Image (spheres, rainbow, N blue to C red):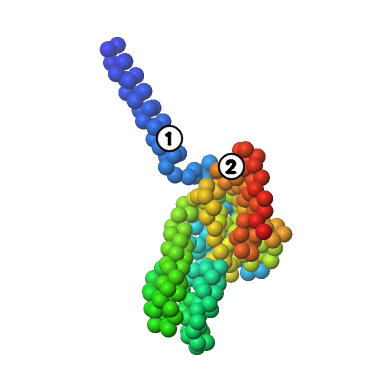
Amino acid sequence: MSSTHPLRRRAGVGIVALLVLGAAAAACGAPASPAGWAPALPVKSGTTNLVLVTHKSRIYALPDQSSNAIWQFPPKDKDSYPVSTSAQDAIGSAVDALSLPDADHSALRAKVADLHVSGPSIKVLKDAVAATGAPADAKSKLNSAIDTVTKFENGSLGKIQAIYGDIGLSSDQKTAYVGGFRGFVFALDVSNGRLRWLRDDTSEGIVGGIAADAGQIYYGTKGKHVYALDAATGAQRWQFDTAGEVWAAPTL
């Protein structure tokens, strides 16, 4: 009987070791569950009468006293999800800079307004650019900008991974500010879930909430930085290194 005890002990030690290794691997490979870090609490916008609720890496906008979502972010269908307002403005400005008749500007502008982060609208716009009489180098530069914007915004929608902490709301409650675990910050139109702007600083995990006040938003990262951004544009105002206590002056 006594000869079986060492085997049992070794088996027990082996099981414990596997459990420890499994827990360590899980901790390194994915963000903590809401049991470890608090998930974002529901936030109500009095302006739109919508309640924003998060679950893992998604946000749902629910009418008050209802469980039917008006929109969700990231969207189910990215082919019909427009690029951000800031991206549309940038591409639209590039279109206006082309030496073209007013009618061509208007036609291109209409297609920019219908540009989505993926799908056929990208080719439709680029084909329209190619059909203009603009110089070849100007066309190439514009098409490159279109590709850069759509690939970045399309890719960011799949890299949120988790949402923790509070959702920030603008003073007029029309814009929601959301931080993703992979470091993306999204400014969303509360009424329809469309992107106003997005930012990716250093892919540092955002595990706390976002505070909004007086035209700025504030958040901290796992990289031990605190950031302040312009709430309207996403431009960085200042940052603070909590590890080395290094202050970065505001960007003017």
* Left or right: where 34 falls relative to 174: left
x, y (%) of residue 80? 44, 72
Q: On the image, numbered disc 2 is attached to which residue? A: 224
The answer to whether any part of residue 68 appears in the image is no
Question: Quadrant of the image for the C terminus?
Answer: bottom right
- The residue at 54%/58% (across/down) is 199
- The residue at 54%/70% (across/down) is 90
Numbered badge on residue 24: 1
Residue kind at label 1, given as amino acid type: Ala
Residue kind at label 2, given as amino acid type: Lys
* Left or right: where 17 falls relative to 190: left
* Left or right: where 231 falls relative to 92: right
Q: Are marks 1 and 2 in contact (CB under 8 Å)?
A: no
Question: Quadrant of the image for the N terminus?
Answer: top left
Tag 2 or tag 1, which sits nearer the N-term?
A: 1
x, y (%) of residue 196? 57, 66
